[in-house]
Image (cartoon, helix red, strand yellow):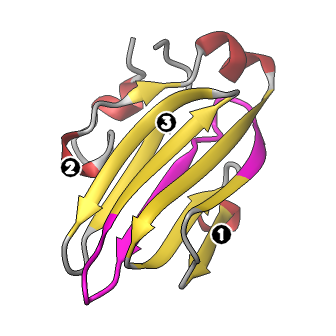
Amino acid sequence: MVSDRWKDPEVLRGAVSGAEAFSLPAADAAAGSFEVEYVVTGVGVSEISYTTGPGGDAGEVVVEGPRLPWRTTVRMAGAEAVPVLSVMLSEDGGRIESVIRVDGLEAMRSTAAGASGTSVCVAEPGGAW
C-alpha cells in the first residue's frame, strides 16, 4: 500500500528510466533503525548524492567525481527517513547502474546512460514489497 504523500504527482515517486518503485518493509520502518547500502557501478559519473536520514539537505551527502564501483552504508531510523540515491553522469556521457539495499534486500535499482544523464532511486518508507 502506498502512503498518501507518494500519490501526489508533485512528489518524486520512484526512479528515472522506468524502474519499478519498491518500499521499505512496514515493520522495519515503524520499528526503528535499518541499514541502507547505496551502490553505483559503471563509467562516467560526475556526482553522487544520497540521504543519511530525515531532514532534507541536512541529511544529504554529495560526492563529486567518485571512483567506480562506489558503495557506502548508512544507518537510518524511523518512517520519515527515506533512502534516496541520485547519480549524475558527466557531460561526456557514460552508463551506470545504481542500487539501494535495505537490510540486505534490494529496494530499488535504476540505470542511466548518455551525456548528463541522471538516475534517481527512492525507497519508499512504510510500505510493503
Q: Which mark is on residue 123?
A: 3
Judge whether 30 appears above or below 72 on screen: above
Residue type at mark 2: give it: Ser
Q: Which residue is mark 2?
A: 17
Tell me the quarter of the picture where residue 34 sits. Answer: top right
Q: Which mark is on residue 61?
A: 1
Of labels 2 and 1, the one closer to you: 2
Q: Are marks 2 and 1 in contact (CB under 8 Å)?
A: no
Q: Residue 123 appears at what percent x and percent y?
A: 49, 36
Q: Is residue 90 visible?
A: yes
Q: Residues within 10 Å of mark 3 (few under 14, many from 20)?
A: many
**Numbered range of the magenta stretch:** 73-95
Q: Is residue 12 left or right of residue 28?
A: left
In the image, 71 versus 78, the foreground residue is 71
Q: Residue 75 appears at what percent x and percent y?
A: 79, 43
Does dot 1 land on a helix, a strand or a loop? strand
Judge whether 113 appears above or below 104 on screen: below
Measured Cα–Cα span from mark 1 to mark 3: 17 Å
Residue type at mark 1: give it: Val
Q: Residue at x 51, y 70 (%)?
A: 48
